[in-house]
Image (tube, rainbow, N blue to C red):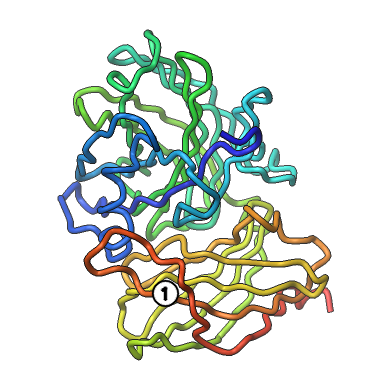
Amino acid sequence: MSSNIYELLNDVQTDMENYKAEEPDDIERKRWKKKAAKDIIGKGKKKRRWKPVAGVCAAAVILAVGVGSGPLHYVVQAAVKLISYDIASILGIKKDLEPYKTVIGKSVTSNGITITLNEVIVNEDEIIVSSTKEYDEKITDENKRFIGVNVYINGKSVSDSASGGEEQVGDNTIVSVSECDIKDVDLSQTFDFEIQYMDYDNMSATWEFEFSASGEELAQSTNTVQINKTFTLDDGTEVYLDKFTDNPLGQKIYFSTSTGNCDYDLVLRGTDDCGNAVEFTLSRWSNGVGRMNISTIDNGNLSDDATELYLTPYTVKFPEQSGKLSNDFKQAGEAFTIDIRPQQK
């Protein structure tokens, strides 16, 4: 393992609506289902069969086998010798997130595992959670549990999908970060949250935490710019790039399609007006709305001095039969410009 790379955050999308066992969405089916079974424990380790469970927003454990091997293209950047439970440190964010996070520091023990909810950040349409899992015994391939996370507000499940990554530290401890999407809730207000961790292999084993948190300060620090750009996929589907958002946690681009479907992996590549390389990669697709997040693996965080982005769309079709993902991206439209800080001009 690299001295400064924990692992890629791999997206796992599970429809949580009313605890029903729903069919996974398009990205889930094409991108994760056939890969999870062989990758879930990591390269060179004993394989475990993926067990889909309705009602759990799972943080997948995908050990990095090469930069870019995970669809989210995030990196957890804290080194083992500098272990931190701070969200900013784990995600490699160099900005001060103290004003936006809620420190919890509560622990619950169940079935031989103590989970500590370290801190959370409520951001736009998601809640980011840092936790540690302390096993009573030395962690092995045989006793390591696959634990999902679900989010409730006022007793109602609001988790739509999630991504996450975790890394074992020492013999007994795992550090993890989960990014859970929240649907149909204005997170700029203060809410009473409940976060429930659940063992996939033992549904009676749960760890529950209650706290209040708000995304108000981060919402006030979020810059939103309408994009209104369109490009066309090879199958004729039009992709509408709707808006760009920017805050201390990072940058996102939201999009939709003319058909309500997305059978392609999407990447936006280019530079900012300072000459720095910039890339946005596909993060979410659910209920006709998609999201792309800035990738910091090769290029780092977006420069504070940047005022414009010059981006070009590239696409590749998801495999219909084989689980192998193609990296043969082809240009799908003309370059375009996003004025990301119009208020400064």
What is the secondary structure assignment of the residue under circle 1? strand
Up the image or down, 221 lies above or below 235; here it is: above
Task: Tell me which residue sits at (19%, 47%) in the image.
Answer: 19
Residue type beneath disc 1:
Val
- Residue 290 horizontal/vertical position (percent): 42, 69
Task: Give the answer, above or below, for where 319 lies relative to 299.
Answer: below
Residue 52 is drawn in which quadrant? top left
Q: Residue at x 34, y 74 (%)?
A: 262
In the picture, which quadrant includes the C terminus?
bottom right
Quadrant (top left/top right/bottom left/bottom right) for the N terminus: top right
- Say how many tags the image has: 1
Q: Is residue 8 left or right of residue 270?
A: left
Q: Residue at x 32, y 12 (%)?
A: 112
Q: Where residue 310 sits: x, y (%)? A: 69, 79
Find the residue positioned furthest to the top: 137
Is 282 placed left or right of 54 in the picture? right
Percent x, y of residue 122: 54, 47
Residue sitting farthest toward the front:
44
Q: Which residue is mark 1?
A: 316
Q: Nearer the viewer, residue 330 or 223?
A: 330
Task: Report whether 57 appears left or right of 84.
Answer: left
* Disc 1 crowd, CA 10 A, few/some/many (<14, 14-19, 20+): many
In this rendered view, identify the residue nearer to me: 329 or 28: 329
Q: Quadrant of residue 300?
A: bottom right
Residue at 49% in and 42% down = 64
Q: Position of residue 218 (x, y in %)?
A: 64, 52
